[in-house]
Amino acid sequence: MPSNNRKIEQAVIGHEGGGKLWDRAFAFAFKGLVYAQIWEDPVVDMEALQIAPEHRVATIASGGCNVLSYLTADPAEIVAVDLNTAHIALAHLKLAAARHLPDYAAFRRFFAEADRKDNIAAYEIHVRPHLDETSRAYWEGRDLSGRRRIRGFAKGVYKRGLLGGFIGMAHLVARLYRIDPRELLEAETLEEQRKIFETRLAPIFDKKFIRWLTDQPASLFGLGIPPAQFEALAGDARMSDVLRARLEKLACDFALEDNYFAWQAFGRGYGKGAGAPLPPYLQERHFEDVRARAERVMVRHISMTDHLAGADDRSHDRYILLDAQDWMSDAQLTELWTEITRTARPDARVLFRTAAEASLLPGRLPDTLLERWNYRAAESKDYTARDRSSIYGGVHMYALR
């Protein structure tokens, strides 16, 4: 059986035995922490999936926060899978913290602020004793700077990982043009948000250096975008134009008091005020439910396809694939959807995102397999428009016929 590192390479490269240099470079980068916070909107997810108390949910874990947010919908069980060891360790950390930190204030400090020295003491006393050995070894291991990884929660964990580094580099480049992205967070209305975007941020994308830089596949590794997804995202347009349009949606389409993704992008963390927007799992009104239901989550270091291949027929109700299919070959897509269809209970739903606008399934799955599923096109278009993360071209929902 291939190692999990080898499976990551196969997922990115899409075939056995070799691949492009950019593919292998991304596969190497993706073995570390990519997302301290997942960049898919859990509110849209839960509306699309209509999770009910009897449902068994299978999802890719990524940063783990959406897994905990789905608990607010009260499912019977969530199986969270991922090939990335850092993401598995982060999911275990968030679950252990939800169950064992003394109260909501400590939980909020740990993940909503994530830059307090007392978070380390909270980890040592309340969380560490309840972590599995592998996750504990990860957090107490050293990063490239020689510091224990758990120290990230005293220094600003959302500035860590590939995504955190990418956002930090974007801020640095903006400052070279005498622009501070944090300016957007001073806006008090949608009209002010748009004015700041159009006069301060948008012109950056017309700079020759920015247009050249964003045409390089490696420039978007920090967004977790592999070369194949880079090509799908760009299409026939310049990547700088695509990124400007996505950033415009993030900056202008949603009020700042309701969009924590904007705070992460423009402020490199969650807002500090009591009314700052937070993911569902970090909101005080959900804390007791998340704590009580955390034991319903099973975290597995395995691919979604392999997890489902070992599951019984008609054993799952809801599937969340994030954008993983953008990485897949036709054969991998067919294998995955064969297992989804076999394990799907009546009324099952599948949700996923794509870099491009259109669903990638037509023409790539066998017709006999795709015909088992009904694509909710109008609803998917609406979910895409309301996804506050604004990174993706499409949010897609399929329901079992």
Image (tube, rainbow, N blue to C red):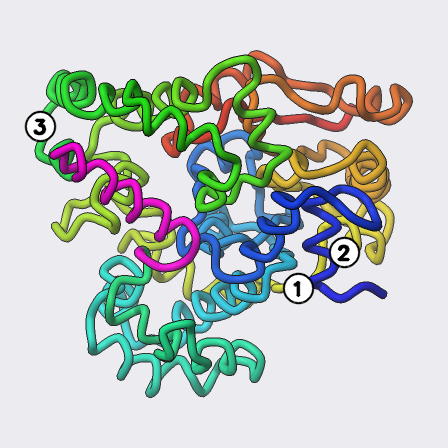
Is 189 in front, or is 10? Answer: 10
Q: Dot 2 corresponds to which residue?
A: 307
Determine the residue positioned at 57% across, 63% down. Answer: 296
* Secondary structure of the residue carrying numbered label 1: strand
In the image, taking residue 91 as reference, residue 18 lies left or right, namely right
Which comes sooner in the sequence, label 2 or label 1?
A: 1
Note whether residue 356 is visible. yes
Q: Residue 66, percent across and down?
A: 47, 49
Q: Dot 1 corresponds to which residue?
A: 300
Amino acid type assigned to the residue bearing label 3 in the image: Glu
Determine the residue positioned at 61% across, 14% down. Answer: 377
Q: Which residues are magenta?
A: 159-180
Q: Dot 3 corresponds to which residue?
A: 188
Is 169 in front, or is 357? Answer: 169
Is 271 in front, or is 360? Answer: 360
Q: Determine which quarter of the picture holds residue 264.
A: top left
- Residue 172 shown in magenta: yes
Which comes sooner in the sequence, label 3 or label 2?
A: 3
Q: What separation in Å lies between label 3 and label 2 (alpha carbons)?
A: 46 Å
Q: Is residue 254 above or below residue 151?
A: above
In the image, taking residue 266 as reference, residue 225 lies left or right, namely right
* CA neighbours of label 2 inside 10 A, class few (<14), some (14 to 19), many (20+): some
